[in-house]
Image (spheres, rainbow, N blue to C red):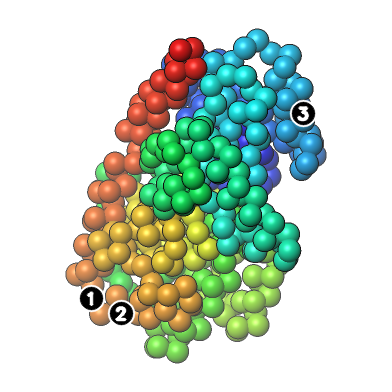
C-alpha cells in the first residue's frame, strides 16, 4: 500500500482508518503486508500496526522517490495498491507488478479549498490527466459518485466496494424525542474542505426560526482557531462546544445523545461518520454533495438539504421538528442500514477482490 499518511500521522483521517482495516484483514489471512507513507516529525522510519509493516520515507515532493528506492531493495511483491489523494504514486510505471488504484474521492473543487489560483487549476487538470493515464489500471472505490467521475476521466475498470465501520450498532436504540434544544454534532477533521463554518453558521438561522440548538464539534485541525472565533463573532459561543479529539467510546456517547449529525463538506468519498452516527441511532442532515447523498438517503435514513448553504440546512432541520414520527423512522432506518456496514460484512469481499488482483498479476 502506497499512501501519503499512515494511521499515526497527525493528519490521518477516515482514509487511513479504512485502509488499516483492509490491510490488517489481509494480514489475518496470512499475507505479508507493507504500507509505505510519508515520514513526519517524531515518527520512526519503520513500525508495525496490527501486523502491517509500516515504512516511512520522504515528504511532500520526495516520498515517491523514497518509496521507489525502498521498493527496489525488497523481494518481488504480488500486488501494489497506489492510493490517490489528488496526486498518485505513479506505481504502474515503476512497480513492475500488478497494480490497482485505490481512490476515495475525486478532489475536483477541493483543490480550491487548499490552494489559490493558478495552483488549484493546475491541480484539477493534473488529477483529470492522471485518471486518464491510469485508464488501463483497475480502480477501487466506495461510492457511485467517485466511480462516475472516474468514468468521465477515462478510467475503464472500476470496482465498487463499500467502506465498513468499526462502530458496532447498538443492540437497540434508545428513545430520543425531539426536545429543545436540538442537539447537533459534527465529527470531523477541522480542515477547509470540511466547511465546519457552515455547520456553525446554521445556528443563527435556526435561532431566527425559533429553534434553540446546541452544536458539539469533535475533532481538531488547522481551522480550529478560526472556527472558535467565528462562533464568537456570531454570538453563539454558548451554543457551541469544541471537544477536540475524543476516544472512540466518548465519541460514540456524544453521537448517541445527538439528534442529528451535521455534514457540510465540499464532497466526500462516502462519509464514514454518517454511518457511525447511524449505528448510534442518530440520523444525519447533510449537504447535497457527492458521497454524502449516498451515505445519507434523503427522507429515509436522514435529510439532505436543498442547497449547500447554512440557511437551507437550518430550514431542513426546522421542518423536521414538526414531524416527530418521521424523525423516529429515520432513526430506525439509519440504525438498521448501519448494521450492513459492519466490517465483518465488508472485509471478506474486499480481501477476496484484492487476492484476485494479486493472482491476476501472476498470469
Mark in front: 2 vs 3: 3
Query: Label 2 vs label 3: CA separation?
Result: 54 Å
- Residue found farthest to the top: 75
Mark in front: 3 vs 1: 3
Labels 3 & 1 near each other (Cβ < 8 A): no
Badge 3 marks a residue whose secondary structure is helix
Q: Relative to residue 328, is residue 79 depicted above or below?
A: above
- Residue occupying the point 77% across, 28% down: 66
Labels 2 & 1 near each other (Cβ < 8 A): yes
What residue did someone put label 3 on? 66
Tag of residue 347: none
Q: Nearer the viewer, residue 272 or 182?
A: 272
Callout 2 environment at 10 Å: few (<14), some (14 to 19), or many (20+)? few
Q: Nearer the viewer, residue 337 or 90?
A: 90
| Residue 122 image point, x, y percent | 69, 56
Residue 340 seen anywhere in this rendered image of the structure: yes
Q: Nearer the viewer, residue 29 or 258?
A: 29
Tag of residue 323: 1
Sequence-wise, the earlier of marks 2 and 3 is: 3
Q: Nearer the viewer, residue 175 or 85?
A: 85
Sequence-wise, the earlier of marks 3 and 1 is: 3
| Residue 83 image point, x, y percent | 58, 37
Tag of residue 319: 2
Q: Quadrant of the N terminus?
A: top right
Callout 1 environment at 10 Å: few (<14), some (14 to 19), or many (20+)? few
Query: Label 3 vs label 1: CA separation?
Result: 57 Å
- Residue occupying the point 66% across, 39% down: 4
Badge 2 marks a residue whose secondary structure is helix
Callout 3 environment at 10 Å: few (<14), some (14 to 19), or many (20+)? some
Query: Label 2 vs label 1: CA separation?
Result: 8 Å
| Residue 174 image point, x, y percent | 28, 56
Amino acid at each position: 500500500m502506497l499512501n501519503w499518511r499512515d494511521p499515526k500521522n497527525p493528519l490521518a483521517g477516515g482514509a487511513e482508518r479504512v485502509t488499516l482495516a483492509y490491510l490488517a484483514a489481509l494480514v489475518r489471512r496470512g499475507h505479508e503486508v507493507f504500507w509505505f507513507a510519508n515520514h513526519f516529525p517524531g515518527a520512526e522510519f519503520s513500525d508495525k500496526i496490527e501486523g502491517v509493516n509500516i515504512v516511512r520515507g520522504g515528504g511532500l515532493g520526495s516520498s515517491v522517490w523514497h518509496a521507489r528506492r525502498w521498493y527496489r531493495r525488497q523481494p518481488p511483491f504480488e500486488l501494489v495498491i497506489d492510493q490517490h489523494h489528488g496526486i498518485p504514486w505513479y506505481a504502474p510505471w515503476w512497480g513492475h507488478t500488478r497494480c490497482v488504484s485505490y481512490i476515495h474521492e475525486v478532489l475536483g473543487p477541493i483543490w480550491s479549498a487548499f490552494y489559490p489560483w493558478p495552483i488549484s487549476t493546475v491541480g484539477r487538470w493534473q488529477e483529470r490527466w492522471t485518471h486518464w493515464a491510469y485508464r488501463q489500471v483497475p480502480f477501487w472505490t466506495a461510492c457511485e459518485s467517485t466511480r462516475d467521475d472516474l468514468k468521465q476521466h477515462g478510467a475503464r475498470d472500476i470496482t465498487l466496494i463499500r467502506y465498513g465501520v468499526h462502530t458496532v450498532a447498538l443492540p437497540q436504540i434508545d428513545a430520543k424525542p425531539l426536545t429543545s434544544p436540538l442537539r447537533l454534532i459534527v465529527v470531523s477533521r477541522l480542515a477547509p474542505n470540511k466547511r465546519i463554518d457552515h455547520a456553525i453558521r446554521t445556528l443563527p438561522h435556526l435561532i431566527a426560526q425559533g429553534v434553540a440548538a446546541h452544536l458539539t464539534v469533535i475533532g481538531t485541525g488547522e481551522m480550529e482557531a478560526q472556527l472558535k472565533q467565528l462562533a464568537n463573532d456570531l454570538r453563539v459561543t454558548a451554543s457551541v462546544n469544541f471537544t477536540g479529539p475524543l476516544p472512540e467510546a466518548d465519541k460514540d456517547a456524544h453521537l448517541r445523545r445527538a439528534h442529528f449529525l451535521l455534514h457540510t463538506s465540499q464532497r466526500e468519498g462516502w462519509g464514514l461518520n454518517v454511518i457511525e452516527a447511524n449505528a448510534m441511532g442518530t440520523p444525519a442532515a447533510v449537504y447535497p454533495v457527492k458521497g454524502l447523498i449516498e451515505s445519507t438517503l434523503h427522507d429515509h435514513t436522514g435529510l439532505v438539504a436543498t442547497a449547500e448553504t447554512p440557511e437551507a440546512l437550518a430550514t431542513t432541520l426546522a421542518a423536521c421538528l414538526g414531524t416527530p414520527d418521521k424523525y423516529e423512522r429515520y432513526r430506525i432506518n439509519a440504525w438498521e442500514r448501519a448494521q450492513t456496514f459492519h466490517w465483518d460484512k465488508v472485509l471478506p469481499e474486499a480481501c477476496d477482490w484484492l487476492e484476485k488482483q494479486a493472482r491476476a498479476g501472476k498470469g
